[in-house]
Amino acid sequence: MPPRQLRLGAFMRPSSIHTGAWRYPGAYPDANFNFAHLKHSAQRLEAAKFDAFFMADHMAVLNMPIDALKRSHTATSFEPFTLLSALSQATTHLGLVATGSTTFDAPYHIARRFASLDHISGGRAGWNIVTTSNPDAALNFGLDEHMEHGERYKRAREFYDVVTGLWDSWADDAFVRDVDNGIFFDPAKMHVLGHKGKYLSVRGPLNIARPVQGWPVIVQAGASDSGRQLAAETAEAVFTAQSSLAVGREFYADVKGRMEKVGRNPEHMKILPACFVVVGDTVEAAKEKRAKLDSLVDYANAIASLSIALGHDASKLDPDGPLPDIPESNASKSGRERAIALAKRESLTVRQLAQRLGGYSGLAMVGTPATIADEMQEWLETRGSDGFTVMFPYLPGGLDDFVDRVVPELQRRGIFRREYEGTTLRENLGLPRPSNRFFAN
């Protein structure tokens, strides 16, 4: 039996998640908002046989103090559909995944945009369903306050039903285009949705043919109990944040177990945790790269992140001394414990710990191509994940390191493809094409 195959997506909005990325020597400071750079990145990812280019989205500038915001390279970015439509013409196999908010958009808009992207790209679109967590986004859409968390997820579940119902408005063979008899489509193969629910009222049908993939691939990113349940019921790929292999395995077992309970095949979902990857000639060289990146995070921003994590004002601590004993507070106990454990594990000073938390504090693989491949293989083989959503430390060098050095090592081990399996994102992820709920295929 052939070994399980890794699935790899690239997290490209922001082009690097790390706060110091735009300041790294040799990095493109404008990588997040420069089409030529993003086009080149997409083409490099496709040459490396990545599954998808993942475009997260924000409906507002980040809700942080202006002194911190002014240092952030994520304050602006392209609107995802505009960018991915352009990239679809510069690539042929790479999946194109965009975030679409179920709280601040209309299902008819979402259905049309993703159906259009799927047709334009020849079947490579994916919809990342989010409910939007930033409360400031509500202020940009005529609301005085954000919808309550539980209500957002209930609306999202109905929203999914409406969008997928709209994609099924037409049978695959509805458009007969009979020139001789003047019949463009068969009315018997058009379905009017006529949805009236608690949150949404949508008549339909969608005014575009059924997508190439039937439905674009459904991606979901929630980690709460409501998010896990929505993923189990709807998602075909899950973008998630996991701090360790043990935590990743618990999440994997939980969500796939929930899938089985609702009658879905667990193989029809790929769990792809975010993974920040820094490659070096040696493990120490990679750690030095990471330390350089972290050092580029402004200390005022960093110490604010550390104070939040500890539930304690860290600005009075000696920046270049070890982290002292920190008393418990009413803030997050898990955040405090993670920060203290990280400082002890890596013998970090207060400054180094603050800059780590202010740069990027999630799952990271920092090492040589071989050690990174070892970690990825262990996650895959022990059911911690089905692959990863790779975050690069900076562009272009961080992406080039992964493409040129880690991918060949994964291919040598037989756990990552050398050629694409098909032309659509579904084919490459090993996902079935969904049947039309209104018409027999």
Image (cartoon, grey):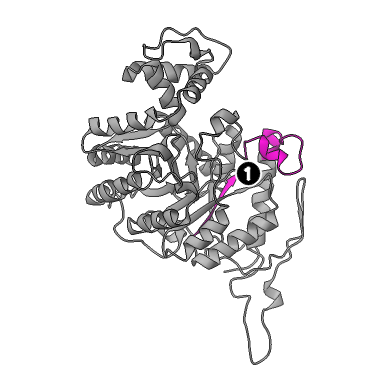
Whether residue 96 appears in magenta in the rendering, the answer is no
Residue 346 in which image quadrant: top left
Question: What secondary structure is marked by label 1?
Answer: loop
Q: Is residue 230 left or right of residue 2?
A: right
Image point 49% across, 35% down: which residue?
A: 254
Position of the C terminus by quadrant:
bottom right
Q: Which residue is mark 1?
A: 59
Residue 123 x/y as whole percent:
50, 64
Residue type at mark 1: give it: Met
Of residue 358 and residue 260, the one placed in the foreground of this image is 358
Residue 232 x/y as whole percent:
55, 43
Q: Is residue 193 above or below residue 141?
A: below
Q: Is residue 385 above or below residue 163?
A: above
Give the class, few, some or many, for how many residues have Cα within 10 Å of label 1's Cα (few <14, many ≥20): some
Whether residue 148 appears in magenta in the rendering, the answer is yes
Of residue 426 and residue 111, the one placed in the foreground of this image is 111
Image point 51% across, 62% down: which residue?
A: 86
Q: Is residue 90 left or right of residue 258?
A: left
Is there any visible trace of residue 214 in the rendered image? Answer: no
Q: Is residue 87 above or below residue 28?
A: below
Residue 352 in which image quadrant: top left
Q: Is residue 154 left or right of residue 129?
A: right
Residue 152 x/y as whole percent:
68, 39
Residue 257 x/y as whole percent:
49, 39
Q: Is residue 224 above or below residue 106?
A: above
Is there any visible trace of residue 127 in the rendered image? Answer: yes
Residue span colored magenta: 124-152
Of residue 390 and residue 67, the one placed in the foreground of this image is 67
Image point 33% across, 31% down: which residue?
A: 292
